[in-house]
Image (cartoon, grey):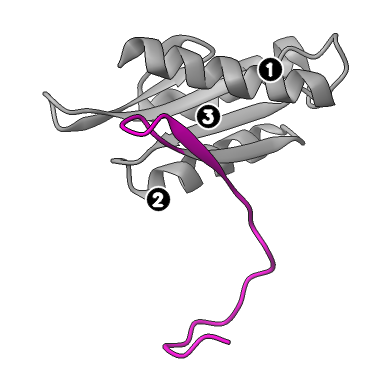
Amino acid sequence: MRHLRASMIFVVAAWLGTHMLAADAPIALVIHSARPKGTFAITVSGKTINSTHLLDAMNDLVMSQGHNVPVAILIHEDVPLSRMFEAKNAAEKAGFLNVRCYYFRSTKGTMSPITFGRPLPFTLSPP
């Protein structure tokens, strides 16, 4: 499983690397479930951090690497989407300008981009 997570990070980093300047090293933010503990773990550029310190970690990265560095948020299939929104909001609040989100399934070895459109009013019968 650890090898699969590393492969996912590499794939995202390689894709982003082809679309960004060579000087910008992408930041991989991975949110996965720690099943034995029943909690969620957040890894930022290979370093596991507590979710309460996510904004501090993002601020430190903005200060050291700048606002234009691409950030790839990978969210595991077992993690609720609300965790992804927390991570995305923290990255944007810290000042990152290029944040992309991906949903990954370790069992199938696949990932899908998550895109955001304009908000719609809530209704039980969407268009």
Measure how far apart labels 1 and 2 are at the Cα level.
27 Å
In the current view of this chain or complex, which residue is farthest to the right?
21
What amino acid is labelled 3 in the image? Leu
- Tell me if label 1 and label 2 are in contact, CB under 8 Å: no
Image coords of residue 101 (percent x, y): 58, 40
In the picture of the structure, the residue carrying the numbered disc 3 is 55
| Residue located 33% across and 48% down the image | 80
Residue 112 shown in magenta: yes
Q: Residues within 10 Å of mark 3 (few under 14, many from 20)?
A: some
The reply to whether discs 3 and 2 touch (Cβ–Cβ < 8 Å) is: no
Q: Quadrant of the N terminus?
A: top left
Residue furthest left in the image? 36
Which label was assigned to residue 14? 1
Q: Is residue 68 left or right of residue 106?
A: right
Give 121 or 109, whichever is nearer the viewer: 109
Of the residues under marks 1 and 2, which one precedes in the sequence?
1
Asked whether disc 3 touches disc 1, contact meaning CB atoms under 8 Å apart, the reply is no
* Distance in Å between CA atoms under marks 3 and 1: 25 Å
Structural distance between the alpha carbons of marks 3 and 2: 16 Å
The residue type indicated by label 2 comes to Ser
State which tag comes first along the sequence, 3 or 2.
3
The magenta region covers: 104-127
x then y, percent, for residue 23: 85, 9
